[in-house]
């Protein structure tokens, strides 16, 4: 598997991931106190959908392309507005050309007192990320393996915030690294919000991941999933998931209203499905 951001920018998985991200940020902004977002696998921050990588796959057309063109009911449209407003902000002429990644979405929503730490290991991507945030005093870009941040960069001095873990799954063992990374991070900062993205390709692999999370006995782990179609043989990507540790109390209900709409919109022939449940409770 290889889910490097530049090839899949704006696809269905990005849409779901970034909707969840913006709803968590909206909750954090309910309080005046500052918070920090640590994006462990930040990518380059901004993607040209007509560039070589994204245009090669064209996945954005069935992702953000469909959502931007959709006529949504008032209530879900209000929940999606922070996300879609950021995307529109990068496309002021109305034509969809540029798609912001998680660090750019986060940065556009931060207040003056909030901070972003964006980490990227790939040398060329780290340089591009640094260029995209040049001169931004609220954002710190670091060329670093994001897994290291789950130990050395926690807790943040603000004592409030989110750790977003969105690995490219270029190497084997990413599911295991997410579990061990969470255990390490949670010991250092048990009150933080953690969001771990994962691809849904092999249901058995995802089930093993969930069992490993259960075995950690870390409380309050919420699972959010969207699938476009049933599993196939041989396996191929058919869904996207995110586990959120210490989720905002409103997130479950918000996503319960949004995920079925997104599942219907982003899938073909009504095959989309959504799932929300607690891996561990209080």
Image: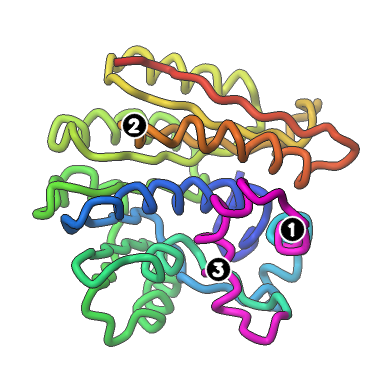
Residue plotted at (85% across, 34% down): 270
Instruction: Name above or below for residue 13 compared with residue 100.
Output: above
In-front residue for pair 11/76: 76
- The residue that label 2 is drawn on is 245
Residue 200 in view: yes
Quadrant location, the N terminus: top right
The x and y percentages for residue 99 are 59, 70
Which comes sooner in the sequence, label 3 or label 1?
Answer: 1
Is 64 within the magenta?
no
Number of other residues with Cα within 10 Å of mark 3, as a class: few under 14, some 14 to 19, many 20 or more: some
> Which secondary structure lies at badge 3?
helix
In-front residue for pair 38/143: 38
| Quarter occupied by residue 274 | top right
Between marks 3 and 1 in the image, the one whose residue lies nearer the viewer: 3
- The residue that label 1 is drawn on is 59
Residue 152 in view: no
Residue plotted at (61% across, 25% down): 275
Q: On the rendered structure, is 187 left or right of 133?
A: left
Quadrant location, the C terminus: top left
Is 70 within the magenta?
yes
Span shown in magenta: 65-94
Number of other residues with Cα within 10 Å of mark 2, as a class: few under 14, some 14 to 19, many 20 or more: many
Between marks 3 and 2 in the image, the one whose residue lies nearer the viewer: 3
Extreme residue toward the right, this view: 269
Residue plotted at (48% across, 41% down): 197
For the residues labelled 1 and 2, the Cα–Cα distance comes to: 29 Å
- The residue that label 3 is drawn on is 85
Which comes sooner in the sequence, label 1 or label 2?
Answer: 1
Magenta part, dominant SS: helix
Between marks 1 and 2 in the image, the one whose residue lies nearer the viewer: 2
Number of other residues with Cα within 10 Å of mark 1, as a class: few under 14, some 14 to 19, many 20 or more: some
């Amino acid at each position: 598997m290889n889910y490097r951001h530049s090839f899949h920018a704006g696809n269905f998985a990005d849409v779901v991931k970034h909707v969840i991200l913006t709803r968590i940020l909206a909750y954090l902004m309910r309080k005046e106190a500052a918070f920090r977002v640590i994006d462990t696998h930040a990518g380059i921050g901004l993607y040209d959908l007509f560039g070589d990588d994204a245009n090669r796959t064209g996945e954005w057309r069935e992702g953000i392309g469909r959502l931007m063109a959709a006529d949504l009911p008032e209530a879900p449209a209000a929940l999606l507005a922070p996300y879609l407003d950021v995307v529109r902000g990068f496309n002021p002429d109305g034509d969809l050309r540029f798609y912001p990644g998680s660090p750019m979405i986060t940065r556009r929503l931060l207040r003056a007192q909030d901070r972003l730490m964006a980490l990227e290991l790939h040398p060329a991507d780290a340089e591009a990320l640094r260029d995209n945030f040049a001169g931004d005093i609220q954002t710190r870009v670091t060329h670093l393996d994001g897994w290291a941040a789950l130990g050395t960069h926690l807790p943040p001095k603000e004592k409030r915030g989110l750790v977003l873990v969105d690995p490219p799954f270029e190497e084997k063992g990413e599911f295991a690294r997410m579990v061990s990374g969470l255990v390490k991070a949670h010991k250092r900062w048990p009150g933080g919000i953690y969001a771990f993205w994962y691809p849904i390709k092999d249901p058995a692999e995802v089930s093993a991941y969930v069992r490993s999370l259960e075995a950690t006995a870390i409380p309050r782990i919420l699972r959010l999933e969207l699938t476009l179609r049933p599993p196939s043989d041989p396996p191929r990507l058919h869904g996207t998931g995110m586990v959120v540790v210490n989720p905002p109390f409103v997130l479950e209900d918000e996503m319960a209203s949004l995920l079925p709409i997104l599942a219907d919109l982003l899938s073909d022939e009504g095959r989309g499905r959504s799932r929300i449940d607690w891996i561990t409770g209080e």
